[in-house]
Image: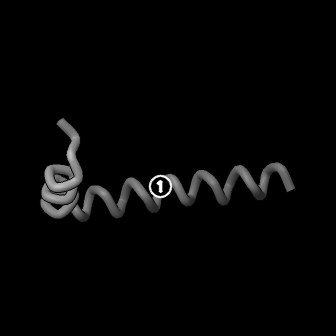
Amino acid sequence: MWNIFGWRVITWRTSDEMINFVEGKLDLLIKRRRATL
């Protein structure tokens, strides 16, 4: 049931949680790249 409209409504309601989730993923990617480099 994850249609685009429903997904947008959910992300709009939990925008702060979504931002924290994305920032956490980016932070992990940066740490992994630094570890490999």
The residue that label 1 is drawn on is 24
Q: From the viewer's perspective, is 26 left or right of 21?
A: right
Q: Is residue 37 left or right of residue 9?
A: right
Quadrant occupied by the C terminus:
bottom right
Q: Nearer the viewer, residue 23 or 2?
A: 2
Residue shown at the point (20%, 59%) measured from the top left: 8
**12 w.r.t. 32: above or below:** below
Q: Dividing the picture into quarters, in which one does residue 2 lie? A: top left
Q: Residues within 10 Å of mark 1 (few under 14, many from 20)?
A: few
Where residue 34 sits, quadrant-wise, is: bottom right
Closer to the camera, 28 or 11?
A: 11
Q: Nearer the viewer, residue 22 or 5?
A: 5
The residue that appears at 17% across and 35% down in the rendered structure is 1
For the point 46% across and 62% down, the residue is: 23
Q: Position of residue 13 (x, y in %)?
A: 13, 60
Give the image's coloring scheme.
one colour
Residue farthest along the top direction in this orientation: 1
Specify the amino acid type for callout 1.
Gly
